[in-house]
Amino acid sequence: MTTVSTPTRNRRNRRAEILEAAARLFAARGFHGVSIEDIGGAVGVSGPALYRHFTGKEALLSEMLLDISSRLRESAVAAATTSSDPREILDALLNVQITFAIEQPALITVHDRELGNVPEPERRQIRRLQRLYVEEWVTVLAELHPACPAARLRAATHAVFGLLNSTPHSAGELPGRDMRPLLRAMARAAIDAAVNAR
């Protein structure tokens, strides 16, 4: 039996292809250094053809960062339902963040540098999704370290994200199979140091 691709699926795949190409270009040249024509050229279409998918560069950037923020939050929620053991949930959360850090360094760079170019309503949504993602971590860490204040756990979570999200700079020489255990060990050491610091 032959599967026929639907126009909706093709359009969704094309949007994902455009977002991926735009992330690479924004990371390499900056938001203002990339034109619609550049993005179109990267996916083999004319610049104006992109307007069938996005109203402009700001809309493209907004969807890019909203999408990854939403996917990270959804993955964290899914991880929290995989087990009743907070240690296993923390392992799953680390896997989510490490996979993102290894596989999506361009998105990390774009978020760090270009969030200010996202219109305010969408920027608020991104920030809200990110706060919810952080709180998934804080909830699990609080179960593991009930005597540790929530503010310290929250600060530790942000610090761990900073460490893991260093991959645009730190992952050049090591392949992913070697970076993954290294990042996991460093993240666990950072959490232990944070909760035990005096």
Image: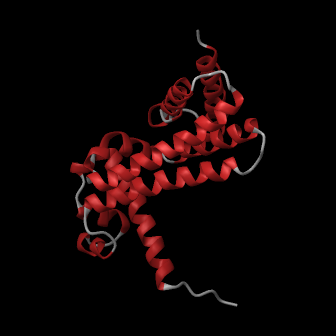
Residue 162, horizontal then vertical, whole percent: 48, 31
User: Is residue 175 at least partly visible in the picture?
Assistant: no
Q: Quadrant of the C terminus?
A: top right
Q: Is residue 22 shown left or right of residue 151?
A: left
What is the number of callouts on the image?
0
Q: Quadrant of the N terminus?
A: bottom right
Q: Residue at x 62, y 51 (%)?
A: 77
Residue 114, horizontal then vertical, whole percent: 30, 45
The furthest residue to the top: 198
When asked about the image quadrant of residue 66, the answer is bottom left
When asked about the image quadrant of residue 49, the answer is bottom left
User: Is residue 184 at least partly visible in the picture?
Assistant: yes
Residue 53, above or below 173: below
Q: Residue at x 65, y 21 (%)?
A: 192
Residue 53, horizontal then vertical, whole percent: 34, 73
Q: Nearer the viewer, residue 64 or 32?
A: 64
Residue 128, above or below 180: below
The furthest residue to the bottom: 1
Residue 57, horizontal then vertical, whole percent: 26, 60
